Every structure is written in structure tokens, then in C-alpha cells.
Image: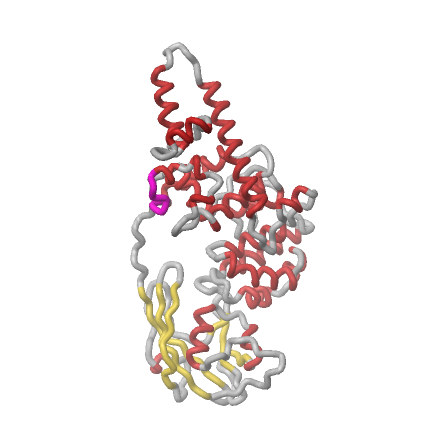
């Protein structure tokens, strides 16, 4: 495990800059000085002070960079606002962190704005019907997050709308694990907490050239972050680490020349920062197959049903499909339709879940009458507001292009095929 060591003087660093980075020089110099020291000398106290100075120096440079180059995000308090005494809203921090799990910042921005406009505080979210929350979440993926979001809001509302201000207390709430609790503690409450997301893992893995595969290296990475945390501005430090990974220390073609930590980065010395973090080869995802059936009424309404509350896509809305799961295939022909109709093949769609890939044959039919038990008709202008996951939107679009898009304010009733 690499331990931070004091950097050499600027004169020494410049003299050797073509052959090695200052961080590498420091490691070699420290080793040589230690081996030549008299056995009776006790250097641990000086070493501890030096390590603390380097830690503070790295944090200071990172925070200085963040003050200038931070991302403008709708849920974030900027460094300037923070300096004026503005404090983050724990509700907005929590909401954004739950949305950002396994999801890109760009994808989350629009959803976040919709949520805070509909439900400006946690008590408003708790008062909302679960179905409305699921509809607002539709398309963001990982739908268990939405169910846990609502359950968590319900519990916080019972506490008077106040989130716990300890990691232990936060982790007792639905959907809040080690990462999210640390992020809320640091960003919302400005308390020291090791916040480690994928961006931070990449920065630390490169800074210290961690060769342990990422899945096994997480405790080591967290320990490095804990040692690097400054005594002040822990929330800004956490966000600075994430911004550094998102904008400079990127997975491909990192912009090392612009990095405020490049003089301390072991991966820069190696000349191959993209080698880190080290990952084991990914296993191929199994391919599952099934069929989806898009039934349309004369007025353009589409037949839907609600999935079971638990399990994959739990509580979401879907068109009728066959019994595919992450482990087994479903029927793939019109013979597997849930009721008889003049089913016509409309195409095939593909979708990738976390643990498997899915191919669905899509069938389309026009029918009359009432929806079968457990199904319901959704009018054409209401389809875009249903709690349809992306895979179901793909199936509907294959049968009726444009059906899931929000109609413009001046558009007439959507024509049907």
C-alpha cells in the first residue's frame, strides 16, 4: 500500500522532471534516507507530520482547483455560496444521490428538476401517491430505487422532515447504504466522511497505482480517501474528488496535464494512467428472449398492466409480455399471446439489464371491447405519463412509432394505425 510522502523541493523536482515525477522521487529519496539513518533515531513523529503536511497540501490544491472548475449542478451549493454561509438542503442532496446511483449526471438533471418542482421537500414527496412517484421515475432505470425513495421519504416525514445527521442513523433508512450515507454526511452536513463513487475510485487507483482488482481494492481506496480528507470543507472535498474524476481523470484519455494532483500521481510516472483501475474481465451476460404484445383500441388507447411490486421492474407498467426473467426465456411467438387477436409481428427490440440482455419479439393488434382482468386501457395522450420502463417504451415504439412521446400542446388527438 502506497503512503503519502512529502514532496521534494521545487528545485530538486525541476532538476529531475524529465526522468521521474516528484512523487516518485520522494518515494525513492525517503527510502534511501531511511536506510542510511542511524538505528537509534526515531523518525516516526517527523514522518507523521510530513505525511500530514502532504495530505493538507493535496487537499488544498484540489479544493483550489474545485473553487474555479466545479461543475454547476442543479442540486449543488457552489463554493462561493458555501463561503457566504449558504447550506445544502439534505433533501436535495439525498434525492440527487439516489438518482445518481448507476446513472449519469446528464440523465439525472431533468429528472431531478421534475421531482423538486412536483415535490419541493421530503414531506411533499411522502404525501405523493406511490404511482405518481413511479411515473415520474419512469425511464431512469433501477426501479427499486424509486420504491425505496418513497419508503425513505415516508420515514423521514414521520421524523418531522429532518434527516438523521449520523451515518448510522442514515443507514437505517430504506435505500441508503454506505456510499449514500457518507455522501449525505459530507455534502449536506459538511461532516468528515469517506465518499467513494466510481469517479473517486478511478482517481485514487491512479494516484497510488493500486494494482489490486477494483472489486477487492475498495477498502484500500476508502482508507486512502480517509487519510486525504482535510480538516475543513469535507463536503467540498468530496465533490471536488468526484468532479476531478468526471472531468479530468476520465476513463479514457485523462487530461493529466490539467490535473491539480499530477505531481503526486503514481500513474503519471508509469505513463499509463488508463491501466488503472485494474478490473477483472467481465463475464458475458446471458441473453434472454421473450415477446411483447401491443394491443391498440380504435381511439388509440394502448392496453397495459402493472407488474408485481417485487422483483425486476417491480411496480412499473408494461404491455403484456411472456414469462421471461433474468434466468429463463419466455415464449417468442404469437401463440404465447395473453388473449387471441390478429397479432402481426412489428419487429424486435433489444435491451440490456444489469445482469442479462433481453430480446423481445414485438406483436401488434387492433382489438375492441373491455380490457381483460388485470389490464387497463391508457389513452393515447396519457401514454407518455405512464410508469413505463425503457424496455416497454421500446416495445410500444416498435409497434406504434412516436406513441410514447409527449404530445405537443397544439397537437390533435394522435392518429392510430
- Residue 97 vertical placement versus 264 (above, below): below
Left or right of 382 on screen, residue 201: left
Examine the image and state in which quarter residue 383 appears: bottom right
Segment tinted magenta in the rendering: 270-276
Left or right of 156 on screen, residue 17: left
Q: Is residue 272 magenta?
A: yes
Q: Is residue 373 visible?
A: no
Residue at 47% in and 27% down: 51
Q: Nearer the viewer, residue 121 or 231?
A: 231
Question: Which quadrant is home to the N terminus?
Answer: top left
Examine the image and state in which quarter residue 66 appears: top right
Q: Nearer the viewer, residue 349 or 224?
A: 224
Residue at 45% in and 72% down: 392
Task: Residue 158 in the image: state x and y as whole percent.
Answer: 66, 52
Residue at 58% in and 42% down: 235
- Residue 62 vertical placement versus 354 (above, below): above
Q: Is residue 5 visible?
A: yes
Q: Nearer the viewer, residue 75 or 309?
A: 75
Amino acid at each position: 500500500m502506497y503512503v503519502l510522502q512529502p514532496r521534494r523541493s521545487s528545485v530538486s523536482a525541476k532538476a529531475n522532471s524529465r526522468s521521474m515525477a516528484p512523487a516518485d522521487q520522494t518515494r525513492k529519496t525517503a527510502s534511501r534516507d531511511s536506510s542510511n539513518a542511524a538505528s537509534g533515531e526515531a523518525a516516526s513523529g517527523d514522518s507523521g507530520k510530513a505525511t500530514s503536511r502532504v495530505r493538507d497540501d493535496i487537499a488544498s490544491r484540489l479544493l483550489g482547483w474545485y473553487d474555479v472548475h466545479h461543475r454547476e449542478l442543479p442540486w449543488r451549493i457552489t463554493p462561493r455560496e458555501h463561503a457566504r454561509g449558504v447550506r445544502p438542503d439534505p433533501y436535495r442532496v439525498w434525492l440527487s444521490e439516489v438518482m445518481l446511483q448507476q446513472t449519469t449526471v446528464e440523465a439525472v438533471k431533468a429528472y431531478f428538476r421534475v421531482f423538486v418542482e412536483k415535490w419541493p421537500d421530503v414531506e411533499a414527496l411522502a404525501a405523493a401517491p406511490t404511482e405518481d412517484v413511479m411515473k415520474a421515475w419512469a425511464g431512469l432505470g433501477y426501479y427499486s430505487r424509486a420504491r425505496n425513495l418513497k419508503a425513505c421519504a415516508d420515514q423521514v416525514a414521520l421524523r418531522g422532515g429532518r434527516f438523521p445527521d449520523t451515518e448510522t442513523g442514515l443507514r437505517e433508512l430504506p435505500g441508503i447504504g454506505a456510499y449514500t450515507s457518507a455522501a449525505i454526511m459530507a455534502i449536506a452536513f459538511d461532516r468528515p466522511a469517506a465518499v467513494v463513487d466510481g469517479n473517486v475510485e478511478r482517481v485514487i487507483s491512479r494516484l497510488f497505482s493500486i494494482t489490486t482488482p477494483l472489486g477487492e481494492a475498495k477498502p484500500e481506496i476508502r482508507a486512502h480517501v480517509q487519510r486525504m480528507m482535510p480538516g475543513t470543507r469535507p463536503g467540498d472535498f468530496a465533490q471536488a474528488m468526484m468532479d476531478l474524476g468526471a472531468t479530468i481523470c476520465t476513463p479514457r484519455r485523462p487530461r493529466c496535464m490539467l490535473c491539480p494532483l499530477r505531481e503526486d500521481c503514481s500513474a503519471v510516472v508509469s505513463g499509463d494512467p488508463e491501466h488503472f483501475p485494474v478490473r477483472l474481465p467481465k463475464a458475458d451476460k446471458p441473453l434472454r428472449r421473450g415477446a411483447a404484445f401491443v394491443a391498440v383500441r380504435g381511439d388509440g388507447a394502448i392496453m397495459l398492466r402493472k407488474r408485481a411490486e417485487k422483483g425486476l421492474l417491480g411496480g412499473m407498467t408494461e404491455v403484456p409480455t411472456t414469462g421471461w426473467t433474468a434466468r429463463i426465456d419466455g415464449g417468442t411467438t404469437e401463440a404465447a399471446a395473453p388473449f387471441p387477436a390478429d397479432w402481426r409481428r412489428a419487429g424486435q427490440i433489444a435491451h440490456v439489464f444489469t445482469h442479462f440482455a433481453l430480446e423481445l419479439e414485438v406483436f401488434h393488434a387492433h382489438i375492441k371491447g373491455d380490457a381483460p382482468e388485470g389490464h387497463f386501457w391508457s389513452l393515447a395522450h396519457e401514454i407518455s405519463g405512464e410508469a413505463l420502463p425503457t424496455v416497454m417504451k421500446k416495445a410500444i415504439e416498435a409497434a406504434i412509432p412516436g406513441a410514447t412521446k409527449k404530445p405537443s400542446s397544439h397537437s390533435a388527438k394522435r392518429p392510430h394505425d
